[in-house]
Image (spheres, rainbow, N blue to C red):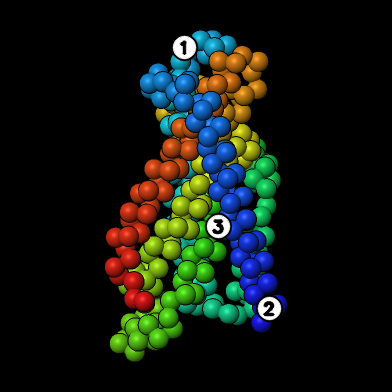
Amino acid sequence: MKRQRLEESFFKILMIGSTAIVLGSLLLILSIIVVRGLPALTLDMVTQTPKGGYYLGKEGGILNAIVGSLYLAIGGTVLALLVSLPIAFWLQLYAKRTRFAEVTRLVLDVLWGVPSIVYGAFGFIIMLWMGMRASLLGGIITLAFIELPIMVRGMDEAMAMVPSALKETSYALGATRLETALKVILRQTGPALLTAVLLAFGRGIGDAASVLFTAGYTDRIPDSLLSPAASLPLAVFFQLGTPFPAVQQRAYAAALILTIIVLIISLISRWLSSRLTKHVIR
């Protein structure tokens, strides 16, 4: 009995310590970004594109990077979603636990862990082969490849949690597999699917290496899919690389803007999840 209490106390302390380390690290990162970035965060930064001499500390803003990041992340997420949802349905309703399905899941897990710079190099090679230049379209397609395994595996695990009795009841009432997927499974896993999409979106909007190769960087707002596009992670990288303290401070402001965007998306996702939870049978 005494040994069991000691083990329980040890693991309780370990859990509390791990939680404290994670929360402390998060608060430290956020405090550094806020303290260093908030003084440089002005209305001009979010409403203007870089002017002449911006990277020397003169006037202008990063509207080009804000708009470019949203274009890239939203476009990549939507494209990945259009491909991921059918794959997840196929894995759960048709392939199930066959050998081919397990190999597919393994491949997706491996793709999840591949560094983004590898995706960027792959996308760059494909663009050269197709005769394309760095563009918004190239960045969107590359980010879709990065987000695809995250979405599929998240959706696959969420759909696996749907009670089998619920699916069997749907089949017993005469529903086809497709109708069961769209009218039963999709409604039951709505909140979890949103979480998978949010995880993929966060990976996409915060990625720098892949879009550096495929989307490029420009001081202008892209006006077509074939125009190059800036992004907030690259704006942070380029501004931190300058020797001017004022520009370096703007890099922290850009990081703060990126954090705020992710926070807003997370809050919207939580609100939508709470609305969809009423359809879930527990």
Q: Would you call the spot at circle 1 few (<14 residues within 10 Å), some (14-19), or many (20 or more)?
A: some
Q: What amino acid type is highlighted by mark number 2?
A: Lys
The dot on residue 244 is: none
Name the foreground residue: 206 vs 259. 259
Between the residue at mark 1 and the residue at mark 3, the CA separation in whole angstroms equals 39 Å
Total marks placed: 3
The dot on residue 59 is: 1
The earlier-in-sequence mark between 2 and 1 is 2
Tell me if I can see residue 112 in this picture: yes
Q: What amino acid type is highlighted by mark number 1?
A: Glu
Residue at position x 60%, y 37% in the image: 208
Q: Position of residue 181 (x, y in %)?
A: 39, 73
Question: Is 277 situated left or right of 123 in this image?
Answer: left
Tell me if I can see residue 79 in this picture: no
The dot on residue 150 is: 3
Name the foreground residue: 254 vs 25. 25
Where disc 3 sits, the SS reads helix
Between the residue at mark 2 and the residue at mark 1, the CA separation in whole angstroms equals 68 Å
Where disc 1 sits, the SS reads loop
Q: Position of residue 263 (x, y in %)?
A: 43, 43
The answer to whether 205 is drawn above or below residue 255 in the figure is: below
Quadrant (top left/top right/bottom left/bottom right) for the C terminus: bottom left
Residue at position x 37%, y 82% in the image: 166
Give the residue pinned by disc 2: 2
Q: Position of residue 78 (x, y in %)?
A: 43, 50
Residue at position x 46%, y 71% in the image: 159
Snapshot quadrant of residue 106: bottom right
Where disc 2 sits, the SS reads helix
Q: What amino acid type is highlighted by mark number 3?
A: Ile
